[in-house]
Image (cartoon, grey):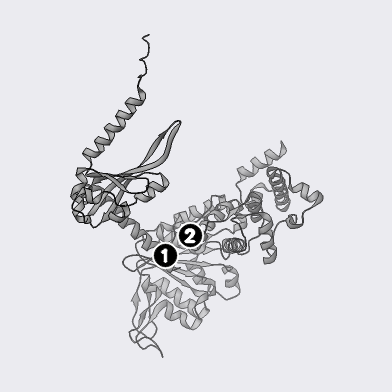
Amino acid sequence: MPAPPALPLDAEGILALAARSMFHLFSSISQGMFLVDSSGRIVWVNEGYRRFLPALGFSSIDQFQGHMVEDVIPNTQMRRVLETGEPILVDLLTNKAGTFVVSRIPLREEREGGAGDVIGAIGIVLFDQPETTLQPLISKFALLQRDLDDARRELASQRNNPLYQHAPDGQRRSKYTFASFIGSSPAAVEVKRHARRAAQSTSPVLLLGETGTGKELLAHAIHASSARAKGMFVSVNIAAVPDTLLEAEFFGFAPGAFTGADRRGREGKFKLADGGSLFLDEIGDMPLGLQAKLLRALQEGEIEPLGSNKLVPFDARVIAATSRDLPELVRRGLFREDLYYRLNVLPLRVPPLRERRSDIPALVEALGEDMALRSGEAPPELTPDALALLAGQHWRGNIRELRNVLEQVTMRSDSQRIDAVQLERILREAGLEQIELPDLSHANGDEEAALLRPLAQQVAELERKAIAAAMASTGGNKLATSRLLGISRATLYERMTNQER
């Protein structure tokens, strides 16, 4: 094999030559260039820079040299380069001489073993007419900026209106999609699967579940995935509207229909939702007298505004929700049986949080991010033992209650990191039900030693106890046990097998 070529004997000379060559190259191809010393005083200017001097108030290079750079070049960032020693390779500079694409590079003294202190800087004008030279890039940047501005305005609109996302045409749009329903537990996956199928139908949907489980979120998602997604999503919380105003709220009223009524009249929610979806929240709280009129509207597809003799057709897909036991209300005569069957075409049971405990870490993360977005502060970080403590709660208020606990512990903590001790104090003060756990704030002696074991051992022990308690509660029925624990049957078998090893 031939011997490798010998290294140049005068490496320092070649390096110096390369540096001079690069300097002359930049000076010749740039639109202008100048040097400043370590104090920021201009010590050299090339011929190309001469054409910018009149606009800066100078008639010659000799006049320009010797001044401090910030005194003669408005908006320059040279001082920052001298102080930090960091280059600004590409930047836009605008002053009375025009708008330029510039580069600023620090100069360092030679020192054995590396670069030395900053002894000056080079200022280079790369382009003096960026609006022409860089037009394609500027156009693309402007388009991206417009998209960003539109997204910010849309986000601001959502924040300002807690119920609706306003589209440019002023219509009410669904605020959530199925991706907004956080969870990968079997219970969460199953309800989303049924909800997606319901979205493809035109029949009424009845969402059943405890308060705070996410029924309204699913109603938004069903509308957003339906053929009516471009139509309006109109919501009425029946429990929040006085009984005397519900009929007018639903069906609207004619001009002068009653004392104090708007002289122009008003369309009701049914007509407002024409072509879209009407969400009737807390349908179980509807007065009996209005139930008959609602039934007729659903059957006939037309409404009669209050104080009017005219029938008004409408085309709205109804999604109803309730946290109450409708069959029990029917038995007690508090809810019409015929209306119940009219609404109960596609019933969807939204599972409580205690049936999907494995979703709690993902929910905590999503809720924490949302809280941080609203407050402008960093999201809370929960330790594994704090998450295990949350998983042991009964959660009567479900996700709404979980959010409340997170907000309380975040507001009352001096740190972003939340441990089980802080969390347990909040839970005890709130009087929430929980699994049997040691009092972490008073742990000592044997209890303290037990808590200092590896976390994996403690979690495994807690898991064994939970599975044993669930098996005892269900009489050994593994399917019922898996549902009670909020895990799949396959996961239950896997955990039980691991425990036997």
In the rendered image, residue 11, in percent from the top left (x then y), is placed at: 36, 23
Q: Mark 2 or mark 1, which is nearer the start of the sequence? A: 1
- Where is mark 2, residue-wise? 373
Q: Label 1: which residue?
A: 158
Q: The residue tagged with tag 1: helix, strand or loop?
A: helix
**Residue 186 seen by the camera:** yes
Relative side of 327 to 57, left or right: right
Q: Position of residue 78 (x, y in %)?
A: 34, 49
Q: Secondary structure at mark 2?
A: helix
Vertical arrangement, residue 168 with respect to residue 12, above or below: below
Q: Amino acid at mark 2?
A: Leu
Q: Is residue 501 above or below residue 162?
A: above
Instruction: Give the label on residue 347, or none.
Output: none
Q: Residue furthest right?
A: 445
Query: x and y percent of residue 29 in the render?
Result: 22, 39
In the image, what residue occupies the spot 49% across and 52% down?
193
* Residue type beneath disc 1: Gln
Between 233 and 78, the one lying in front of the other is 78
Work out whether 472 lies above or below 377: above
Vertical arrangement, residue 115 with respect to residue 229, above or below: above
Inspect this view and state whether residue 436 appears. Answer: no
Q: Nearer the viewer, residue 296 or 245?
A: 245
Q: Quadrant of the C terminus?
A: top right
Q: Is residue 189 left or right of residue 55?
A: right
- Would you call the spot at circle 2 few (<14 residues within 10 Å), some (14-19), or many (20 or more)? few
Q: Which residue is more in the foreground, 241 or 77?
A: 77
Question: Residue 74: which quarter of the image?
Answer: bottom left
Disc 1/disc 2 C-alpha distance (Å) = 13 Å
